[in-house]
Amino acid sequence: MTAPENGSGTTSGSIPGATVAADVRLDGPWTHRDVAANGARFHIAEMGDGPLVLLLHGFPQFWWTWRHQLPALAEAGYRAVAMDLRGVGGSDRTPRGYDPANLALDITGVVRSLGEPDAALVGHDLGGYLAWTAAVMRPKLVRRLAVSSMPHPRRWRSAMLSDFSQSRAGSYIWGFQRPWLPERQLVADDGALVGELIRGWSGPQPPDDKTVDIYRRAMTIPSTAHCSIEPYRWMVRSMARPDGIQFNRRMKRPVRVPTLQLHGSLDPAMRTRSTAGSAEYVEAPYRWRLFDGLGHFPHEEDPVAFSTELINWLKDPEPDR
């Protein structure tokens, strides 16, 4: 199922396609279209030809967070694709399906729908959590793994439960467990809270007002706030449930593809100490890169440094441990 380039599509429910297009199908050197995967429709922006690199956004953003990496990867000889996760941007807002196992199947389903045998997954924040998950669940479809600003899911769980500093840094996730109020807070005053979070989690050079306004508008598209929060509700509420315990056990399986972990030294939402322990879950070449002076969004705060590090690693035939 496809939509015209840079044109309007439709999403599930009553959201007018033209409204969604105006807010999230932003013009650029990329091509917009929709692909079907795992029982839903996903909006993607793509550029270039070559091995597939699939870019996965985090909260509270959408595909546009990768606007700098799309042309950089395309110029380096890759097929760069940034997708909107389920419930966000131009993708379907389904009533359920926001557990990490299903969201990871969305990602690997998009890889298949694009006609590719595998992909290098690059995930930030929640997208990183799901990239870790996909690499464990569908290892044959993941060629390489790069994760920014997010530890391995087992490390995330441990840090949130046993490290008071990380639990305090992630207090917004505990706040998401309340019914309805978090959604209302995210869309109040035209998404003002989104701007506060992005600026608060950034380093010394936060994004400009125009960039923040784009993220604010995207969050106010009907149902987006609710769908954005649902994965975090599952991550916390499932901790003592059979499905959450089973997921945590499943994630014991090691990642067996080359892995790059990227982190900003000033990240206030995900502490460096919490993220650095993820190497124990990787049985493959592993590289750690700490960006000095950057916050939670290194790919936006210093896109040249981030893209250079990523591309050099992707091109390295034998990435070091």
Image (spheres, rainbow, N blue to C red):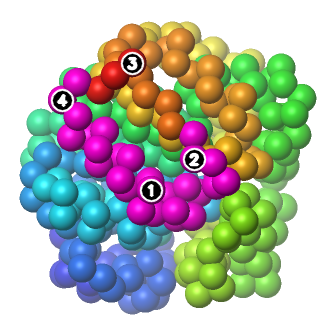
Q: Amino acid at mark 3?
A: Arg
User: Where does label 2 land, which residue?
Assistant: 291
Residue 158 location in percent, x, y?
72, 20
Disc 1 from disc 3: Cα separation? 21 Å
Residue 276 location in percent, x, y?
62, 26
In this rendering, the answer to whether 229 lies above or below 211 is above
Q: Is residue 161 left or right of residue 247?
A: right
Mark number displayed over residue 317: 4
Which numbered disc flags the more N-terminal residue, 3 or 2?
2
User: Where does label 3 land, which residue?
Assistant: 321
In this rendering, the answer to whether 216 lies above or below 97 is below
**Residue lying at 21% horizontally and 75% vertically, measured from the top left:** 31
Which numbered disc flags the more N-terminal residue, 4 or 2?
2
Q: Amino acid at mark 2?
A: Phe
Q: Is residue 309 within the magenta segment? A: yes
Marks 4 and 3: CB-CB under 8 Å? no
Marks 1 and 2: CB-CB under 8 Å? yes
Element assignment for label 3: loop
Which numbered disc flags the more N-terminal residue, 1 or 2?
2
Closest to the observer, 226 or 78: 78
Residue interval drawn in magenta: 290-318
Q: Image quadrant for the N terminus?
A: bottom left
Structural crowding at the residue carrying mark 2, measured as other residues with C-alpha within 10 Å and reported as few (<14), some (14–19) or many (≥20): some
Residue 199 location in percent, x, y?
73, 68
Structural crowding at the residue carrying mark 1, measured as other residues with C-alpha within 10 Å and reported as few (<14), some (14–19) or many (≥20): few
Q: Amino acid at mark 4?
A: Pro
Q: Is residue 220 left or right of residue 196?
A: left
